Image (cartoon, rainbow, N blue to C red):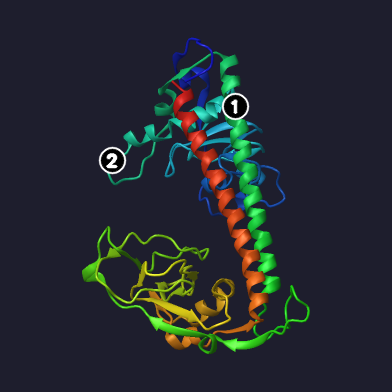
Amino acid sequence: MHFPLLVWEQRKLGDMANILRGASPRPIKDKKWFDTNSRIGWIRISDVTSQNGRVYTLGQHLSKKGQEKTRVVSSQTLLLSIAASVGYPVITYVETGVHDGFVIFDKPKFNLDFMFFKLQSIQNIWNKYGQAGSQVNINSSIVANTSISIPNIEEQKRISILLKKIEENIYLQQRKLEQLKLLKRMISLSIYPNFNDRIPIKFNLNSTWNKKKLKNITNYKNGTTHEQHQLLKGKFELINLNSISKEGRLKSSGKYINQQFPTLRKNDIVMILSDIAHGQLIGTSAVIPTNNKYILNQRVASLSPNENLNAVFISKYINLKQRYFKKMAAGMSQINLSKKDVEDFKLWVPNFKEQTKIANLLINFDLIEKNKNKKISYLLNLKKFLLQSLFL
């Protein structure tokens, strides 16, 4: 797939630009090479990956001495990473020094955006220059002698305009998603108070919030081991350490059993009791959506809410207060929560009607977030398809 039938020709990258390797001052950690007041940046691979290859800001800046030991390029220069994370194309939008982990496309004879997308589409070709199990590194000669198919400059522009529109839409949707998550967190923090705080924002100004411990409002159970019964397909799905995302969503563990054990009930809350040290999942919870489908595995607990308690309200409260569970977890390489740690968690609880209003608000946020993620996924797949189809 490409625009009107025009001739695409094979050209070496080195015939369309001067391929120059960057240079690095040594030793790189010496402070004399850097100056926070300088306008000349210092690009690193982390800047590339965090900004999806279009680099507008840089965390480090070079001193005059540092600039003398590298290659400084102007804004809107195309680079390609050639060490460690190989094959990432970059367009700089600031003046920056370029270290020896990149090559520079100097004096290009092509549309910059077109080549940026073209290099994205062939990113995996550089893997052939690495040994199995070793880090891939390439050099300026390999890049210069690599041949690609390329159309005339007008078709380059048309292709790049289309792909850039999709790329900009992806960025816009990602920004909206970040803002949505921030808004949801701010609202959650306003609604759910810390135990010693005053009563939070209310839907009903006359509602009363009472201080409770989880042991007073839920029935706690530990999971049991089912390792010997596990299948890839089966009647009942196991709830294990892989069943809850860090956002507090239930996901498939991919593990099943056919043996009849007590199943979890709709609106049971399941909670992660074990994680690696500094892990993000300890104490994270999710709500079971249906009866007679899920069975609890070891190192996961279930909390069955008492009558007149909304499971989503409690689960969201638990997930917002992760700091408590990380603080209570014991262990070195692996951390664990005890029944007491969980049951002693304190929270404010309003009446059932107020709980439900709060839960519904946060569920709506989750649905909007889910739809945003679907849209981003669609756009990413569309871009991937076009990268594969538009370039010969």
The location of residue 137, given as percent across then percent down, is 38, 39
Going from N to C along the chain, the mark reached first, 2 or 1, is: 2
Q: In the figure, is residue 237 to the left or right of 121?
A: left
Instruction: Identify the residue at horizontal 52%, vertical 23% (top origin).
Output: 18
- Classed neighbour count for the residue bearing mark 2: other residues with Cα under 10 Å, few (<14), some (14–19), many (≥20): few
Q: Is residue 229 visible?
A: yes
Q: Label 1 crowding class (10 Å Cα cut-off): few <14, some 14-19, many 20+?
A: few
Drawn side of residue 279 relative to residue 359, left or right = left
Quadrant of the image containing the C terminus: top left
**Front one among 297 and 109:** 297
Dot 2 and dot 1 residues touching (CB under 8 Å)? no
- Callout 2, which amino acid? Gln
Q: CA distance from mark 2 to mark 1?
A: 37 Å
**Tag of residue 131:** 2
Q: Residue 162: give its label.
A: 1
Above or below for 360 versus 274 = above
Q: Secondary structure at mark 1?
A: helix
Residue 381: x and y in percent read: 49, 38
The residue lying furthest to the right in this view is 205
Q: Is residue 317 above or below residue 211?
A: above
Image position of 217 (left or right of 300): right
Residue 91: percent from the left, percent from the top?
A: 59, 34
* SS at mark 2 in the image: loop
Q: Amino acid at mark 1?
A: Leu
Task: Note whether 166 is above or below 246 in the view shown.
Answer: above
Work out whether residue 254 or residue 104 is closer to the camera in this orientation and state it: 254
